[in-house]
Amino acid sequence: MKKRVLIWLFILTNIGISEEIINSKNEKENNKIVVEEAVIKQNENEDKKYYEMIDGKIYYKEYWDTPVLVKEIDVKTFAELEYSYAKDKNNYYYKNKKILVDKNSFVIENYFIAKDKNNVYVLGRKIPGFASEKLKIYEGDTRYITDGTDVYFIDTKLMNSDPSTFVILDNETAKDKNNVYKYGEILYGADSETFEILGNIYSKDKNKVYSISYPMDKADAKSFKSIGDWYGKDKNFVFYRDDIVENADSKTFKHLEYKYGIDKNYVYYSNKRIEDADPQSFVLLNKYVSKDKNYVYYLTSKVLNFKPEDLKDRNIDTDKFVIQEKESEYNMAILIDEYEKREKKRLEDLSDKGITEMGFDYYMYKNLIYYNDKFSRKIFLYKADIETLEAVEDSYNEILKDKNRVYIAGRMLEGADPVSFEVITGRYYKDKKMFT
């Protein structure tokens, strides 16, 4: 965790391009919104608006994305609905795209699903061949739906699924008589009949223990149990996530709070031992600070300028701590504040140099598009068509396209058809020629 935090901060605060380029007030019923020609029942709890008017035109903007013009919309009769839907007197829209629906029967079921008398829609896209009257949304995870014949995760049909035995286990996991599913993907090798959820990240069947979707080869399924948000143990080992906690005593180990654990011999933070900590006198003061009879600790590091008797409650000013280890983990609130200040200055510096940040490491400089690969430290140049360049819907600006090409994370997707290219779900895409 220590290294990941430091690497994350280094990357975020050192983004750069080479020296040559840049140095309805009705309450909802059953979580549905019925949209009729003249009636809009909006979710009174929906306070996040995605549409805005700029210079007399309607734009759609999501999070950090660049606002995208909603074409052909009638401004006078425009109304924002819920979950990125909108309408005017003539049409309905999902994000910035017009969708063809039956206006009198259109129903927004939840964030993912909508329907009318003829079709079912997922994130604004029609599911071909899905009979609207047969739609069932599974309780517990509204991303799973069925038409009575197959089960779908969002709009992806699950292989060899059985709707009659399909059940939601938690917000990540489901199963039927044939398979166990994690986020709509089959958990291959899992025994559906004996599969059970143990805790926050752990599950098991008669043969194996799983940390999220990963089998834990060294864990004993018969004796394994979850003992906290991230800890588990069996007759032989203690685990933090899927890592063995070295030298931990399985019989006496117990979870305290947050990422702290303790056994008869040692105190632990995640899978690391807190050196010299005394388990008999150890007290956790808050998420970051602890003490025993000898020392004060900030996560796994000793604090040199405080004595245990100096700290009596959980309200501690960690800014005054002098940490023994130079590369210790720091208070995230301080880090975030520092990052925001640096990020503001970084954007100002880019603007001064005539550079526009487009999101997800894409930049525009003198009408040319650059992609900054922070991991390989390489910069890729594309002669994209600026006038038609846009983010692909549902790609969160990671995928761009113009009238000629599609670009994914800085790489040009050879042979992709930009007109028909779309995101299906997650990392799955398709155009008129292929599915990948």
Image: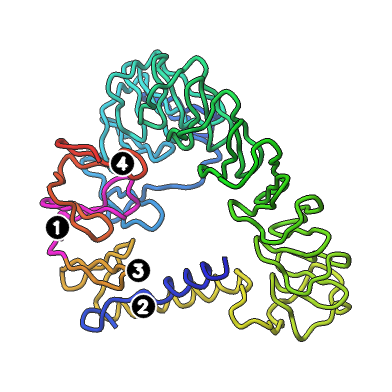
Alpha carbon of mark 2 to alpha carbon of mark 1: how far? Answer: 25 Å
Residue drawn at 55 percent across, 23 percent down: 167
Please state which of residues 270 and 38 is positioned toward the viewer in this rendering.
Answer: 270
| Image quadrant where one finds the N terminus | bottom right
Q: Which secondary structure, mark 4?
A: strand
Q: Earlier in the sequence, mark 4 or mark 1?
A: 1
Instruction: Determine whether label 4 and label 2 are within 8 Å by CB.
Output: no
Mark 2 vs mark 3: give the one in front. Answer: 3
Image coordinates for residue 429, horizontal then vertical, percent: 27, 41
Q: Earlier in the sequence, mark 2 or mark 3?
A: 2
Q: Earlier in the sequence, mark 1 or mark 3?
A: 3
- The residue that mark 1 highlights is 387
Q: Which mark is residue 16?
A: none
Image coordinates for residue 346, horizontal then vertical, percent: 38, 77
Please state which of residues 379 and 209 is positioned toward the viewer in this rendering.
Answer: 209
- The residue that mark 4 highlights is 428
Instruction: Determine whether label 4 and label 1 are within 8 Å by CB.
Output: no
